[in-house]
Image (spheres, grey):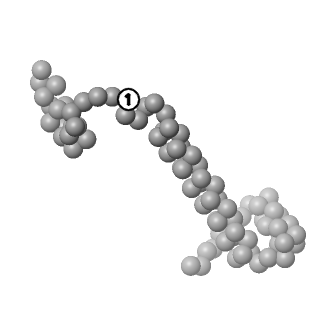
Amino acid sequence: MRINAKLDDERAEKLRQLQSLTRLSTSEIVKRAIDLLHRQQAGRSRDKLDALLSSDFVGCATGPADLASQYKRYLIRDLEE
């Protein structure tokens, strides 16, 4: 995939500095930045899931065994009552 991006002056300077410091091409810097951001975001999603699963929230309620698949039927019934 080819990318065409406009950078403001500040980011263009940061890119030039990264190229100078690392001797990497613009393409390689963009690839590494994408990889880094992806790892960070994937880690955050996993952290959130782990926190939810380890909390007392999951499994704290009681109800019919088929509630997940039949919730509309139960909602209509309860609203009619």
The answer to whether any part of residue 9 appears in the image is no
The residue drawn where x is 64% and y is 66% is 35
User: Considering the image in quadrants, where does the C terminus appear?
Assistant: top left
Q: Residue at x 57, y 55 (%)?
A: 42
Residue 29, given in percent of the width and then of the height, sits at 73, 71
| Quadrant hosting residue 14 | bottom right
Q: Nearer the viewer, residue 27 or 54?
A: 54
- Apparent side of residue 53 relative to residue 47 in the rendered image (left or right): left
The residue drawn where x is 54% and y is 49% is 45
Residue 13 x/y as whole percent = 83, 64
From the viewer's side, name the closer residue of 12 and 33.
33
Image coords of residue 15 (percent x, y): 79, 67
Q: Quadrant of the N terminus?
A: bottom right
Instruction: Judge from the rendering whether residue 7 lies leftward or rightward of residue 19; answer left or right.
Output: left
Quickly name the residue at label 1. 60
Q: Is residue 73 above or below residue 28?
A: above
Residue 38 in view, yes or no: yes
Residue toward you, 77 or 56: 56
Left or right: 67 with respect to 80?
Answer: right
Residue in the image at 14% along x and 36% along y: 73
For the residue pair 36 and 49, the one nearer the viewer reads as 49
Q: Quadrant of residue 57?
A: top left
Q: Position of residue 80 (x, y in %)?
A: 11, 24
Count all numbered tags in the image, as a single digit: 1
User: Mark 1: which secondary structure?
Assistant: loop
Label 1: how many Cα within 10 Å (few below 14, some 14–19, many 20+): few
Disc 1 residue type (three-letter):
Cys
